[in-house]
Amino acid sequence: MGAGVDGFDPGQRYLMPWPGCFATHFYADAATVLAFPLEEPYSPEDAVTLPIAFVTAYYALIHLARLEAGETVLIHGGSGGVGFAAIQLARMIGAKVFTTAGNEEKRNYLRSVGCEYVYDSRSLSFTAEINAVTHGRGVDVVLNSLSGDGQTHSLMLLAPYGRFVEIGKKDIVEAGSLPLRQFNNNLSFFSLDLDRLMLQRPALMRTLLTDVVKLARNGGVRALPYTSFPAYRTSEAFRFLASAKHIGKVIIDYTNLDELQADVLLRPLPSVHVAGVYLVTGGLGGFGWATAKWLVREGATRLILVGRRPEEQSEYHKEILAYREKGIEVLTFAIDVSDPISMAALFEDISLRHIPLKGIFHCAGVLDDALIHNLDIDRIINVLEPKVSGAINLDKLSAGFDLDYFVLYSSITTLLGNLGQSAYIAANTALAAIASNRFRRGQPALSVEWGAISGIGMLHANEAAARLFEAAGIGSMSPEEALDKLPGMLALRFPALACAKVDWEKWATVFPAMDSLPRFSQLRFARGGDGRGGKHMMRLRELNENQRLDYIISQVKEIVSKILYVDASKISDTARLSELGIDSLAGVELQSALRIEMGVNISVLMLARDETIQQMSQSFLEKLYVDDASAPV
């Protein structure tokens, strides 16, 4: 099939099941027919039983064997999809049908649908029994799916000028043999492989599909019996299929996907080599040093730690010395990971040591939070360089090494977003792209979007960000708890993953717009209460009009006091936010806290007006009235 034929792209795989549609999987460059509408009474389940089974049987009996009225045909596996389709076609032609099945239940079923001559496919007795019925002549056509002696005995049943159509693959793949003497009776042998036919003879495949659809439309054939499994029981469907207990087809129904879950296939996880060396950038910082210690716990005995500061200036200097006393080789280098020349020299040094570099963990990073209008190019570069340029250097310089691990440390803010961290999020987004590129090249790669890590690292040094995370429902993990999750993530076949504790209900309250983002479309939020500061609205209804503003002022003071760590009673009603020390980032925290506590959405522009506490509270009160139809009047 050429490009653009029937509107399909060559090389693309399609599946189009819709009500009353005869559909099958195929490659667009292998067939020009995908789906044919069928009139009632074909349901989607009925229609999906038709294509493979009937095309196989049709090609075997009509195109290859040229079965004619009055001839005899032996159809093995008559209770299966192809077997049952072949029985229908043979009857339509007017041939006499002999068939086999693997157990008594299946044989009884075939007898119940009108098959007179039914035998056991798991015994070779069918040969003598059919010879007895045909007075030693045998049959004109065999549609065979048996292997070994079953295949040989079926061949011996052929009458002169008989045709043998093989649809099984076991004896062909295993290079089995057949007695050639029997072919002296002018016998013909055909091997049918529908997969190859679809790819190599697309025009013929179209003809076969078209002919079968015509038969289905005019009533010449009917849908096959089937056993249906919902999509979430797919594995059970394959076990049922493997048990050979089914009659007709086994189909999987994707109509209802509510209970569908998928388990990701894990890949073999390489162990940490005692004889290997592991490079950790940012290794003299909090989470980097925690990663180095995790590697030692996993069995590493050689570490290379890279940081901008000399080891002696690191708060972990004494711990590093203690590790060396225990026999752990820890080398430290005061290098800027974004400097390609310095990093090239480091990798040259690693090569000269003749110790295999088995893993790279890129933990380096710089946090410089600011709203976009306060950023300049130098501040942006300051954040991008360590993560992005550093990762690019590591990717290029490690090309000649046989790595087991290439792990980049990112942040959950890349997934969730965070005001004031546009440069940081951009840098982490680049890490995911670098990991994806490596993954597509078949190289080890994982970018981990870590959540809040307690006690160490960037979040520990930024109390405002830590409070904002907590207020937004993002809980913290200890370094050990987080790193214990790393092997499980490395075992998954994904280049980028997130690992965080998130209270999604709370987070959705803080960021209500997330409901409209496609990335969160699979999350369901059963939010308790009215989610809009209901307790405050109830209290306002209890108060008279003159008391309501004072109540809001007191609540705003409480919120501001928690952000600034000051006594609420010392905050004046006439104090402005700028006078209290509320900068742009603290304003973001205030915005989130007001949304959570008061149930009111306040824009950054409203906060930027730098009103007094009293003026701001009046604006909040008016907004509460407007936003809540049941507010006090």
Image (spheres, grey):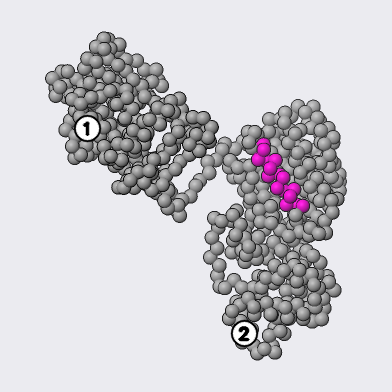
Does residue 72 appear in the picture of this structure? no
Question: Label 1 is placed on what type of residue?
Answer: Arg
Which segment is the magenta one?
Answer: 423-438
| On screen, residue 589 above or below 339 | below
| On screen, residue 605 above or below 314 | below
The residue pinned by badge 1 equals 91
The residue pinned by badge 2 equals 632
Residue 444: x %, y % from top left: 65, 36
Does residue 387 appear in the picture of this structure? yes
Disc 1 versus disc 2: nearer the observer: 1
Magenta segment main secondary structure: helix
In front: 304, or 462? 462
Q: Residues within 10 Å of mark 1 (few under 14, many from 20)?
A: some
Residue 478: x %, y % from top left: 68, 55
Residue 64: x %, y % from top left: 32, 22
SS for callout 2: loop
Which mark sits nearer the N-terminus, 1 or 2? 1
